[in-house]
Amino acid sequence: MSDALPNTGPLRHFLQFRDFSAEEIQYVLDRARLIKDKFKRYEPHHTLHDRNLAMVFEKASTRTRVSFEAGMYQLGGAVIHITTGDSQLGRAEPIEDTARVISRMVDLVMIRTFEQSRIERFASHSRVPVINGLTNEYHPCQILADIFTFKEHRGTIRGKTVAWIGDGNNMAYTWLQAAELLGFTLHISTPEGYGLDPARTGEPGPDILKTFANPHDACDGADLVTTDVWTSMGYEDENEVRRKAFADWCVDPAMMAKAKPDALFMHCLPAHRGEEVTADVIDGPQSVVWDEAENRLHVQKALMEFLLLGRVDGKG
Ligand code: CP
Ligand code: NVA
């Protein structure tokens, strides 16, 4: 491992959004702004020179893979990519042993997997920081990018209203953590049986979480309307049942018309036009989905830098 810029702080992971304080999230977002601006000016930013990132994918990916891989190279480091199928994970090597071995060889690990308990088991046996690149329960890197994107277009998200339309999935739970941490209101509308589980959410106050049976009501007065696929990875067996249950949870121009006139539309992608969103919304003027995807690159560079170096304010 490089000894150029040792991290003297305690070992930190980013397994869910609330692993960071509001102030740490703000620091990472500010740092992402600087990193993005330098990137746009073609200025090198090699703060992780000689550092290695291992990426472990147990589910498919386009954005997460490309943004972490490109990002680490742009920071001066290198990347190792493994999947379940091409590693001993697919032949039942315990995740704890995998963590012990990989974390002796690299500086940082990103994992996309199934249960949150699996990434937690990995992290608790890792010598290096671990980043959640999506689990069944959470997708914190995506929400980091989404909040950065909102700030870029509309300023602070504090006090604003975000409408979540569709499945009570990993994205929805992460939006809720962000609302609690950063002080905005989440309106959520899901088909019956697909809502957030109170055993997991606790009882957030109405200034944080409001649930609506009708998705149009959830959009009322929103600053941001967002949705996701009806069937997340790992739940494909439920596809046909979900297509029927979610038929009225398609973000269309009528829903967008209920939101504020300057409301944004976001989707973490991949999207299914004609299912969770109509083509005229996702490809329309209120949609910022391509900025949202690009910003994965910039926020994750800031995140990796923070986990490995701590605060480097004033050091370019
Ligand atoms: N939004 C997102 O995480 O995309 P991928 O599944 O392509 O990584
Ligand atoms: N909720 C989706 C997000 C994909 C990026 C899934 O977990 O498949």
Image (tube, helix red, strand yellow):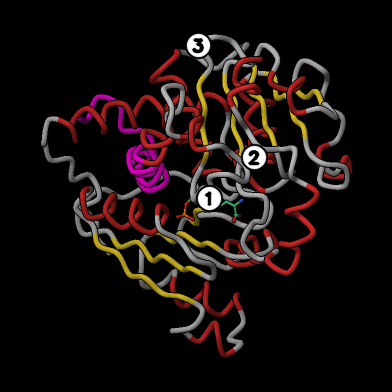
Residue located beneath label 3 in the image: 262
Which residue appears at 66% of the width and 37% of the height? 250
Q: Nearer the viewer, residue 220 or 171?
A: 220
Locate residue 57, reporting x and y percent. Answer: 48, 68
Tag 2: amino acid = Thr
Q: CA distance from mark 1 to mark 2?
A: 16 Å
In depth, the one of 88 and 192 nearer the eye is 192
The disc at residue 13 is 1
How packed mark 3 is, by other alpha carbons closer than 10 Å (few <14, some 14-19, many 20 or more), is some
Q: Is residue 194 left or right of residue 88?
A: right
Residue drawn at point x = 54 percent, y = 82 percent = 89
Hey, what amino acid is under mark 3? Asp
Picture layout, residue 128 above or below residue 266:
below
Q: Are marks 3 and 2 in contact (CB under 8 Å)?
A: no
Q: Secondary structure at mark 3?
A: loop
Mark 2 and ligand 2: say if the CB distance to the nearest ligand atom is below 8 Å.
Answer: no
* Disc on the earlier residue, 3 or 1: 1
User: Which residues fall within the magenta stretch?
Assistant: 294-316
Kindly state the secondary structure of the residue where label 2 is placed.
helix
Q: Viewed as shown, does residue 49 lie left or right of 129?
A: left
